[in-house]
Image (cartoon, rainbow, N blue to C red):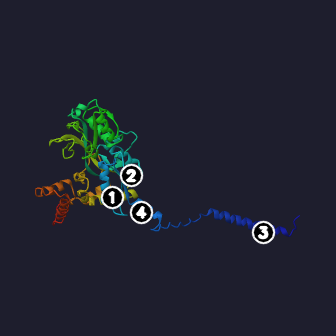
Amino acid sequence: MLKRATIPALAGLLVLFGGAGAMAREAAREPTPPARVKPPEPEPAGTESALSERMNANTVSVITGTPGGTYFRIGADLAFVLDDGDKLRILPILGKGAGENAYDIRFLKGVDLGFVRTDTLDQLRQDKRLKDVEQRIHYVAKLFNDELHVIGPKSIDDVRQLAGKRVTFDVKGSGTDYSGRAMFRGLGIAVEAVNVDQPTAFEMLRKGEVEAVVSVAAKPVSVVAGFDPGDRFHLVKTPYPDTLSEAYVPATLTSTDYPKLVKGSEPIETLAVGTILGVYNHPKGSERYNKLARFVEAFFTQYDKFLAPQRHPKWREVNLAATVPGWTRFRPAQDWLDANRGQDVASAAELERFLDEQPPGGAADKERVYQAYLKWRQARANRPGALSAARP
């Protein structure tokens, strides 16, 4: 039994602990001030993490085409001309061609740019899995035309004679696979389509296993130019009908393009489809959007360098300001053109104008002519009032 003297002491303890519990409950009801989070320290410039961040922030990848093809060579030109050390690096990636490139731009996380064609949106619209393709893929600039090449036996002198025959259209998903088939449909020619790579296709042609090989690519195509036709094969004429889609235009192939396949001075009629530099439409202000804006600035301001003789001759067809019906231009590219409207932007027409002014035989030394062209263009740009007079 507790002594009477201990009861007040116990009562005091109960009051003390009860009061402490009440204070604790009261404190629990009051909001706790948020703890201050110290911002992370920036990585020192010399660390591995900083190196990784810098490289990824300044590298733009472009999906091209098969080895040795025009798209891969154009991608290599982009890499050589626009390389700016740690500020900008262009990374060409081998691809299947324009048909598959559109899907790579749309879905592959590491792909920023790619070579596609003016008929690519029509191709994507046919894929019911895709939504809002016009908003997902935009274009930086129209580049050049890709010509339809049909190589067959000399007994066939018109593409319409291939109706019902076995014809190859490169590998599945390639630009030739889509554009070539679409061109044949537009021409009203139904064939038995075969998908194999081009070297295999030419071997099948030699053996008589197919009647023709189709390639839709920018001339001169190395695999076509390298084919030895002997006295058996040639480039087949493809007349342009007025009923064909506006995505396709008339074109010609000459003995200069393919000395082994075109005999004489008479050009071979064919079709062509435009190639454009496609881009994924990243949200404005995002890291990848900003990186692509830097690419656009470098590409447009240094375009002169792509006209050098060691670069692919197709660069001379490019008109940076040309619009593509049905397509939306990437906002940084449109902004650049708007800001530089009226300025002397290099174009194929301008180069032709310069060459027309040269004395006969003056274009023999390509490097000398190119350097003279750059001086001529600079002189025109420096004329008093040259830019202001052209501005609206």
Question: What residue sits right under mark 1 in the picture?
Answer: 295
Give the image location of residue 108, x and y in percent.
Answer: 41, 49
Return the disc, 1 or 3, that comes first in the chain's sequence.
3
Return the disc, 1 or 4, that comes first in the chain's sequence.
4
How would you rate the neighbour count of disc 4 (Cα within 10 Å): few for under 14, some for 14-19, many for 20 or more?
few
Closer to us: 13 or 390: 390
Q: What residue type is labelled 2?
A: Val
Q: Is mark 2 on a helix, strand or loop?
A: loop
Q: Nearer the viewer, mark 4 or mark 3?
A: 4
Q: What residue type is labelled 3?
A: Gly
Give the image location of residue 118, x and y in percent.
Answer: 28, 45
Question: What residue sits right under mark 2 in the picture?
Answer: 111
Return the disc, 2 or 1, that comes first in the chain's sequence.
2
Residue contact between numbered discs 3 and 2, judged by CB atoms under 8 Å: no
Figure check: 223 above or below 291 = above
Q: Which amino acid does label 4 sit on?
A: Arg
Q: How far apart are marks 1 and 4 (CA)?
A: 15 Å
Q: Which of marks 3 and 2 is in front?
A: 2
Q: Where the C terminus falls, by quadrant?
A: bottom left
Residue contact between numbered discs 4 and 3, judged by CB atoms under 8 Å: no
Q: How far apart are marks 4 and 3 (CA)?
A: 68 Å
Question: What residue sits right under mark 4 in the picture?
Answer: 54
Question: What residue sits right under mark 3 in the picture?
Answer: 12
Q: How far apart are marks 3 and 2 (CA)?
A: 76 Å
